[in-house]
Image (cartoon, helix red, strand yellow):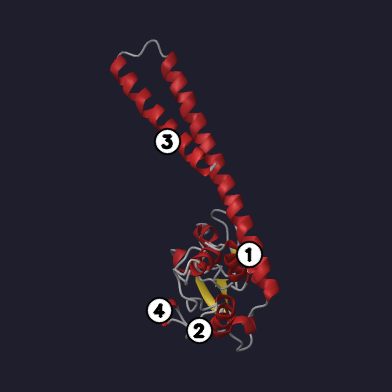
Amino acid sequence: MNEALADRINAALPQTQCTRCGYPDCRSYAEAIAREEAGIGQCPPGGAEGIRRLALLTGKAIVPLDPAHGQESARRMAVIDETWCIGCTLCIKACPVDCIVGASKRMHTVIEDWCTGCELCVPACPVDCISMEALDGHATGWAAWSPEQAEASRQRYHQTQERRAAEQRAQEARLAAKAAAKLADLSAASTLSDPQALERKRTVIEAALARARARQSAKS
């Protein structure tokens, strides 16, 4: 894959991280285009102007936006009906740029300037208290979204990914430590009436520890 081309393509995408292109984030879509595994007409937030920019970068012909991936529309923002919010935090986990703030069993709200309009929080809400509302004006695509906003969104996305990865590693470390302590307790048990039961528990815990170490090694 041409990494330099992927970098340029990624810089030409709006960084909403909406996944409508069929890929998990804008960078993945950029890499797929660079590998010629994806077309340039799969990004509704970029719209027609986005397709024109991608065509210039890739040398491909300008094509219409593929309707299978959505339609170009005015920029929208997530709005939470705070009277119905139950504080489940599922929308917070779904947001790719950490623009939803709140805590478990506490009312959530949206940081307006950070919302990319990705809509990923809408299906995540179990009580349907999130709606997408159009912002003022009728501009669509890049006419409603600036390069500065795209870059800020890209940075927030990477910060969010890094934070979540760190939290996952910490959780796995806590579970591994707990399992190791349990294994030590079992090994120290001298009054257990069923040695075979002790061995079975030891086997299960050692297997869990091995899986945790394997995951850590793979991530490293």
Which tag is nearer the camera, tag 4 or tag 2? 2
Q: Amino acid at mark 2?
A: Ala
Q: Which of the two discs, 3 and 4, labels the residue nearer the N terminus? A: 4
Q: Quadrant of the C terminus?
A: top right
On residue 211, which mark appears? 3
Task: Name the residue located 53 percent from the left edge and 45 percent from the top edge.
Answer: 168
Left or right: 21 in relation to 158: left
Mark 1 sits on what residue? 154
Q: Quadrant of residue 209?
A: top left
Q: Foreground residue, 193 or 52?
A: 52
Q: Quadrant of residue 110?
A: bottom right
Would you say residue 101 is visible in this rendering?
A: no
Q: Give the CA distance from mark 4 to mark 1.
A: 25 Å
Mark 4 sits on what residue? 68
Q: Give the CA distance from mark 2 to mark 1.
A: 27 Å
Q: Foreground residue, 84 or 11?
A: 11
Q: Which of the two discs, 3 and 1, labels the residue nearer the N terminus? A: 1
Mark 2 sits on what residue? 61
Q: Foreground residue, 42 or 91?
A: 42
Which tag is nearer the camera, tag 3 or tag 2? 2
Q: Amino acid at mark 4?
A: Ala
Q: Give the CA distance from mark 3 to mark 1.
A: 33 Å
